[in-house]
Image: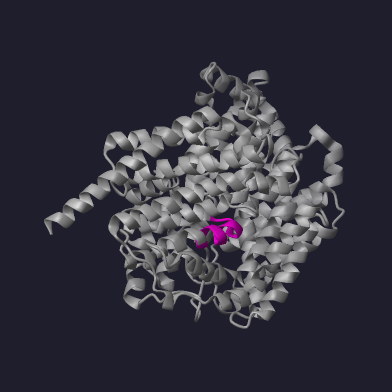
Amino acid sequence: MSLFKKKENTLPAVDSSAAAAGGDTAADLEAVMRKYDRESNTRIWEGPAKTGVKLIMAAFSLYCIAMTLWSTWLPETKLCLFVGTIILLGFLTYPASKHHVRPNYVPWYDVVLMVLGAGAFYYFAFNALSIIKLSTRIETIHVVIGTIGILVLVELCRRCVGLPILCVAGVLLVYTFYYLMSWNPDFFEALKDVIYKLFYTTSGVIGTPINVCYTYIVLFIIFGAFLERTGIANFFIALANRVAGWSSGGPAKVAVISSALCGMVSGSSVGNTVTTGSVTVPMMKKTGYKPEFAGAVEAAASTGGQIMPPIMGAAAFLMAEYMDLPYIEVAAKAVLPAVLYFAGIFIAVHLEAKKLGLKGISKEELPKWGYLLRKCYLLIPLVLLVWLVSTGARTMQFSAAIAIAVAIVVGFINKDERLTFQKILDALESGAKGAITVAVACAMAGIIAGCITVTGLASTLINAIVGLSGDTMIVGLVLTMLCCIVLGMGVPTTANYCIMASTCAPILIQLGVPHVAAHFFVFYFGIVADITPPVALAAYAGSAIAKSNPMKTGVTATKLAIAAFIVPYIFAYNSELLFVGVDGWWSVAQIAVSALLGVFSIAAALNGYLYRRIPMVLRLALVAGGLCMMIPGTLTDILGLVFVAAIIVLQRTAAKKEQAAGICKE
């Protein structure tokens, strides 16, 4: 079900036939979500069972808030309780297969797995102190319990996250056993070592990723759930309509702006594509955009929402923790790359509209400025959260808790979508459901990091990539990019970054990439996995709504998001794009202007239109000029500007001649 309900004076009208053609029905949207978003492939609960599950989920969200704010228990105790409960909720939510779902039904084997898996973690939680004292002298019963806990967690990961991350973890586990048995061929001793490291220490399942998830991510997920129910999504769409809906191809520009704003707090590229796409894709098709282009615009913009400061799908707060930087610095460094990303999509959308001769939405259908001004209070929770975290007035946990409380107050004020007790329960339930997938992915990231630590594989991988790269950093960057895209397939934003920061960022740092640039590099390529064929889940979700060819939609989305594939390489070589090492405001202004012109040039080349269709030779020249301007440096800026300016003059002159010739013929 879409979170964005059309209200009077908020959205332009979309007729029923267009909506139907775009799949804008609750049934269609649910089907799309179930197909492309694993988080939506859930059990069906009805009647009292539904109420019971909802209350359990809500209680878990409240428990997480309370424990995060006030718990002083041992990390092993509180983290194992957290993971154990996640397993219980996970098996209540996710079936073994989407083909085996029927109302109010949990098969006996799922009950067994649920009890055994949760019981293993609860056992460790309640006996943490004695097990910690045992250290490596754990007994056979401890090995059995740890093995059960990890295997059940793996099965839950298969259900709610997917196979790519399991394949990586599986290969690393096999290598870990091979490494340990090469020193001692006793399999049980190797198993004992693996289980001890991965289950009974804070270097495995309950390592840094799950600790970050428990401490920060869950609260931000709950905050996002409450924020959505204040009606802020409708406000974002209405604002985007007012700002850009009137211009050429307005609906596509509305999709870009609204998806960027909604996506930064959603934390899910696929979920954002489906929810905002239910409104924007039919509008784009009705305006005259091809279905593949409409679906691609929505997918690219929704994916970009995850890199949109100040929230970045909650990843900004995690990046601050991992990079040991103030949150406000992380958000500031993300501004220019995000602007370049969305500028590229916006320019491509505008040029496509000009090429097709598309018009915007009539001003009579646009929301009024007065309406938007009256609704500005919906931004208060978001602004407050950013202010609290950026100033350090409160810890991240308390900042998120305060923002949740303010979101509830704002929700009660909004008479159009007034918050009710039922909606509060829904928000708490949604927060708990969102936490399941992220927590499981973070737990698997802990296993991956643990295997790398046990075997010393990090240095081996780094040496291998450095060896393959030789003196050419670009080879190492390309190999790391491919790793990030594979690891990022279908993984939620926050868990995605945890995985990348643990596995791929150290490789780049060893290659000589600056610390901040390395983290941004892996984060960007982990995110764009959702629009990169052949596994482009956000693009496929967009194509399902647009009723278009999935692969063509994925390729088009990749072209639209080309800035996300170029910018990370640029700041890997020169961190000035991230405002690292810049010399005064003039340097920043030069970087921003030249990079924007470079994005414009590349977008025009890929679109093939600038006043008129661009010949292939000039398109290649535009790409070259655009890349020159995107690379920081005065000489490259001047060279690129000459290229691009010359081509613009040529295209404009040729277009005027064609127009004059056409008039003469008439």
Residue drawn 38% across the image and 75% down it: 14
**Image: magenta residue range:** 258-268
Q: Nearer the viewer, residue 657 or 144?
A: 657
Q: Is 354 drawn above or below residue 103 in the view shown?
A: above
> Is residue 265 inside the magenta stretch?
yes
Which residue is farthest left?
665
Say whether residue 380 is left or right of residue 600. Answer: right
**What x and y, as percent, mark residue 201?**
76, 39
Magenta stretch: helix, strand or loop mostly:
helix
Res 608 seen here? yes
**What x and y, as percent, mark residue 444?**
62, 43
Q: Quadrant of the C terminus?
A: bottom left
Residue drawn 50% across the image and 52% down it: 303
Q: Nearer the viewer, residue 69 or 448?
A: 69
Q: Is 475 drawn above or below residue 600 in the view shown?
A: above
Q: Nearer the viewer, residue 579 or 385?
A: 579
Residue drawn 46% across the image and 40% down it: 598
Q: Is 50 drawn above or below residue 575 in the view shown?
A: below
> Is residue 439 inside the magenta stretch?
no
Say whether residue 642 is left or right of residue 573. Answer: left
In the rendered image, which quarter is residue 170 located in? top right
In the rendered image, which quarter is residue 386 located in? bottom right
**What x and y, as percent, mark residue 356?**
28, 57
Res 64 seen here? no
